[in-house]
Amino acid sequence: MSLAAIKKLRTYIKADAALAAWCTAHYGKPLRHLIGYKNPVNANDYPAICYVPVRAKRGEQPNEEEMVSIVIGVNEKEMVDDVFVGVERSAEAAKLIVGRLLIYGSSISIKDDVITETTDLGTGHPFYESELQFVMLVEPSTAVDDAALAAMDDFVTIHADYDVDPHQPQAEHIKWAEEPPDYTTSAPELTDTTTLPQ
């Protein structure tokens, strides 16, 4: 999995002035922006945002997909009006990040503009986390090579071999692709040869 999309996402969120101001106002220090998930060990680990690549779909056109998890972590011991402050703080940060991601003209493209938010219900008090999951649409990793595409002008003939059940092993396919094709031990069920107009 390429980290280019995750690094771009981190840079984009790190540049959010409202999120930085929120963190300074509540914690007196900047957020840590980590790629990968860090399990909280002590209060110094927080506040933090972890950017976790979950899975990717490659080869899609015009965009590939990167499923991402953003975990927002805070350390809050207090309770105000029977509300754990950690629940409130992690929700505030999540709201700021969602707003940043879904703003019109964002450089980050979210599939269907859908972000799923999950909270940990304070099971690790005083450490609280909110998780945002979404699919980013990114540039394809397998771009077309313009030089190779231009060289295709030299093609005069296109040939294809079709193997139907029961399939031949790959070694036989390699023989069929040779110039000239080697059909001594097996042959495709169907061949197609097309001469292109010049």
Image: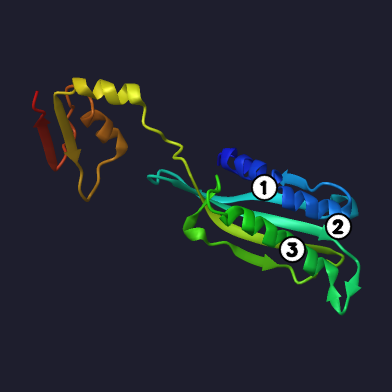
Give the crowd class for mark 2: few <14, some 14-19, many >=20 residues within 10 Å. few
- Residue drawn 40% across and 33% down? 143
In the rendered image, which residue does mark 3 sit on? 92
State how the image is colored: rainbow
- Disc 3 to disc 1, how far (Cα)? 15 Å
| Horizontal arrangement in the rendering, residue 130 relative to residue 102 (left or right) | right
Residue 126 is situated, as x and y percent measured from the top left of the image, at 87, 65
The kind of residue tagged 3 is Glu
The kind of residue tagged 2 is His
Classify the position of the C terminus by image quarter.
top left
Q: Are marks 2 and 3 in contact (CB under 8 Å)?
A: no
Give the crowd class for mark 1: few <14, some 14-19, many >=20 residues within 10 Å. many
Q: Secondary structure at mark 1?
A: helix
In the rendered image, which residue does mark 2 sit on? 26
Mark 1 or mark 2: name the one nearer the start of the chain: 1
Residue nearest the viewer, comparing 1 with 174: 1
Residue 122 is situated, as x and y percent measured from the top left of the image, at 80, 70
- Residue drawn 60% across and 39% down? 3
Give the crowd class for mark 3: few <14, some 14-19, many >=20 residues within 10 Å. some
Q: Are marks 3 and 1 in contact (CB under 8 Å)?
A: no
Residue 24 is situated, as x and y percent measured from the top left of the image, at 84, 51
Mark 3 or mark 1: name the one nearer the start of the chain: 1
Quadrant of the rendered image containing residue 14: top right
Inspect this view and state whether residue 42 appears: no
Quadrant of the rendered image containing residue 158: top left
Q: Secondary structure at mark 3?
A: helix
In the rendered image, which residue does mark 1 sit on? 13
Q: Secondary structure at mark 2?
A: helix
The kind of residue tagged 1 is Ile
Residue nearest the viewer, comparing 185 with 196: 196
